[in-house]
Image (cartoon, rainbow, N blue to C red):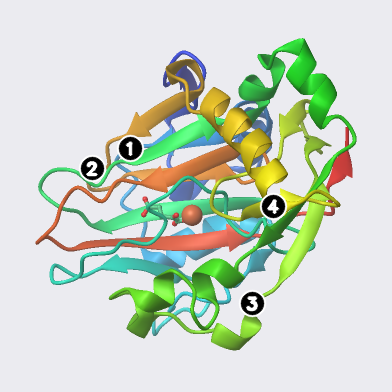
Amino acid sequence: MKITAFSEGCGAVVTDLQLANLTNDALVELRGVFAEYGLLFFRNQDLTPDQHLEFAERFGRIVINKFFKTTTEFPQIAEVRKEKTQQTNIGGGWHTDHSYDAIPAMGSILVARTLPKTGGDTQFANLAAAYDALPKNLKKRIENLRAVHSNTHLYGENGLYRLTDLSEQLGGVDRVGDATHPVVIIHPESGRKVLYVNPGHTIQFEGWDFTESRALLDELYEHVIQPQFTCSFNWLPGSVTFWDNRCTWHQANNDYQGQARLMHRITLAGSALTAA
Ligand SMILES: O=C(O)CCC(=O)C(=O)O
Ligand SMILES: [Fe+2]
């Protein structure tokens, strides 16, 4: 397999590799590359749902998203669907998947199924690189902090998504909840320090009031979304993206109104997060 950096500080493209026919040696090598980059892009894979599932199961343990519909064939595969008549897309703002769980998901494997003619890229951010580059005083201010992560404001009864034309395809209104996590974690595989807050799910710092939290969170978010830590992936038929939810953010561009887009996502289970 060949690894090429995708952008200055975000992601890598893996070529000369078919995910459907991975040897055990290649899987071991891929684990190392995944730990190093936290965000891998693959082209021309043409994975069937069976092969998507098989790769996911070889890499880790699958967790099922509480809110998304799944394919009829495989309850492990979530549909990230936008019909051409829908206005709102799933994951349209910066977030990381499942940070509202006590033990957040390790990674997500997204496969393109139906793509718009133009638009529909997914943007990513590298939170290990962003942490390293934080000014010293900001690192000091977030040392030892914990933050509350939630999904109630999105998927709860009056949550943001419930008030949009996505609501019909979402389940789990009664399965909302919160979790608290360290703001700076040690990545379990790379050993790097990572900034673990995100605009989609982080509500506030534990023990702080909302306004105070908002100001510091916004300062951190402004730092992360700089070009040196972010990239934008243009999907093509056969493309697959595999990201690590502990050290990346992503958001799906909603710039293809009037066209349909369908992706298949499998989410892999993680382990409890450790404070830096
Ligand atoms: O549709 C995309 O590009 C990403 C959507 C998303 O947030 C996800 O699948 O977790
Ligand atoms: Fe997501």
**Would you say 121 lies left or right of 184 here?**
left
Give the distance between the C-alpha atoms of the residues marked 2 and 3, in whole angstroms: 34 Å
* Mark nearer the viewer, 2 or 3: 3
First in sequence, mark 4 or 1: give its number: 1
Q: Amino acid at mark 1?
A: Arg
Q: Callout 4: helix, strand or loop?
A: helix
Please say whether residue 192 is visible from this viewpoint: yes
Q: Amino acid at mark 3?
A: Val
**Image quarter where ligand 1 lies:** bottom left
Q: Are marks 3 and 1 in contact (CB under 8 Å)?
A: no
Q: Callout 3: helix, strand or loop?
A: loop
Residue at disc 1, CB closer than 8 Å to ligand 1: no
Q: Are marks 1 and 2 in contact (CB under 8 Å)?
A: yes
Q: Which residue was labeled with disc 1?
A: 43
Q: Nearer the viewer, residue 96 or 53?
A: 96
First in sequence, mark 1 or 2: give its number: 1
First in sequence, mark 2 or 3: give its number: 3
**Would you say 112 lies left or right of 230 here?**
left
**Would you say 170 lies left or right of 245 here?**
left
Give the distance between the C-alpha atoms of the residues marked 4 and 1, in whole angstroms: 43 Å
> What residue is at 83 percent from the left and 48 percent from the top?
273
> What residue is at 60 percent from the left and 67 percent from the top?
151
Please say whether residue 15 is visible from this viewpoint: no
Q: Amino acid at mark 4?
A: Phe
Q: Callout 1: helix, strand or loop?
A: loop
Give the distance between the C-alpha atoms of the residues marked 1 and 2, in whole angstroms: 8 Å
